[in-house]
Amino acid sequence: MLPSPLTIDVRRGAISSLGTVLSDRRIATEGRIAVAVGPGQGARIVADLDLPRCEVFQVHNGGVDDATELGKQLRAGAYEAVAGVGGGKTVDVTKFAASMAGIPMVAVATNLAHDGIASPTASLEHESGKGSYGVSMPVAVVVDVDYVQAGPQRLVRSGIGDVVSNLSAIADWELAGNEQGEPVDGMAVTFARVAAQAILHRPDTVDSVDFLTALAEALVLSGMAMSVAGSSRPASGACHEILHAIDQLYPQTSNHGELAGLGALYASYLRHRYQDADAQRMTTIRDCLLRHQLPVVPQDVGLDIDQFARAVDHAPATRPGRYTVLEHLALSPAEIQHSVEGYVQAIRG
Ligand SMILES: [Zn+2]
């Protein structure tokens, strides 16, 4: 059985279908709907919608406390379903709250910063950092390309880094399969790889509606890969261990997708240098990141070689039990330092 949303609607003006989506009898029979909106474009969007009977809740930040509070309100109001309208944080808060209240959730994404739109996980901030929580997959996914295009371009570009990092995550999963006997799910790998390949070689950019549509579909497909796998495995390996380490050691360095892309490129370099992987893979990822003005070396996100090397050394501790090229090579701090120097040279050269 394939766990998939009932509806996936990715196009210009898609948000106008939200009323129809919410009146689907498989989602709500009596029309008791809650809508959670983010601090950005959310409120204006809801004002434009023809949803007279829905109750609107404001999501203030991307924290666990905010999500728990919303979950309590949804439970107390006995709603049948909730739609989360906004960016990644709003969607994640709403996913968590819906799971807590035990009701279906419709994700309405207004940007494409990462692959959490349709995934069964929510990334939320808590008092000592950021945590990833298992939640139910959204029952429907709506991405309005007009709103995505009107949003900040840097955020949309970062979604490219997240989807391309799938290639590195899959290589890590296959390595764990070979070395550790970890089961590798072929369907999840297919979804995750096709998502990355759909973006990797495209010559157009976030200026094009066609590109934004492809990126939105790729991010939804990545979410489905995680849903099939039952974990973030197909979209998160050494690339994400490095990004979590950077988040922990140097908070606010950069956003999720930019760091995921950088981590994936470095991991690809390790595979090339220590495991005889084809250099072509590394250069293809590099060229894609450069085409979209995404960071390719530590300096691009304001880190020096020492700082990045420290993050690589710390990375395996951020995700105990996940076997990747980092755990496999188990380089010493001095070897890591050396590898980062070689990496910067290889990428720049
Ligand atoms: Zn990610």
Image: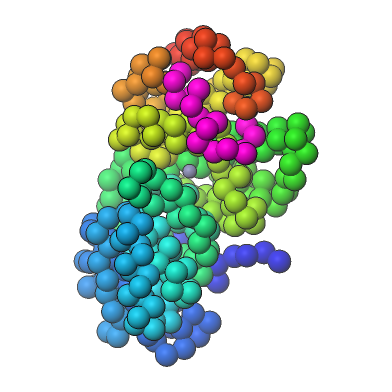
In the image, the segment drawn in magenta is: 309-325
User: Residue at the location (43% across, 48% down)?
Assistant: 131
Question: Which residue ends up furthest to the bottom in the rendered image?
Answer: 30
- Up/down of 291 relative to 92, above or below: above
**Does residue 106 appear left or right of residue 38 in this picture?**
right
Query: Secondary structure of the magenta portion, mostly?
Result: helix
- Up/down of 99 relative to 328, above or below: below
- Up/down of 306 relative to 34, above or below: above
Question: Can residue 256 be seen from the camera position used here?
Answer: yes
**Does residue 122 appear left or right of residue 300 in this picture?**
right
**Does residue 293 appear left or right of residue 272 in this picture?**
left
Q: Quadrant of residue 159?
A: top left
Residue 108, horizontal then vertical, whole percent = 39, 64
Residue 157, horizontal then vertical, whole percent = 38, 40
Question: Can residue 216 be seen from the camera position used here?
Answer: no
Residue 292, horizontal then vertical, whole percent = 40, 33
User: Residue at the location (62% across, 65% down)?
Assistant: 3
Residue 111 or residue 38, whichever sits in front: 38
User: Residue at the location (70% across, 35% down)?
Assistant: 176
Asked if residue 322 is among those painted magenta in the image, a careful observer would answer yes
Number of residue marks:
0
Residue 92, horizontal then vertical, whole percent = 40, 58
- Up/down of 249 relative to 195, above or below: above
Residue 137 or residue 306, whichever sits in front: 306
User: Residue at the location (49% across, 80% down)?
Assistant: 27
Question: Which residue ends up furthest to the front in the rendered image?
Answer: 128
Quadrant of the image containing the N terminus: bottom right
Asked if residue 166 is among those painted magenta in the image, a careful observer would answer no
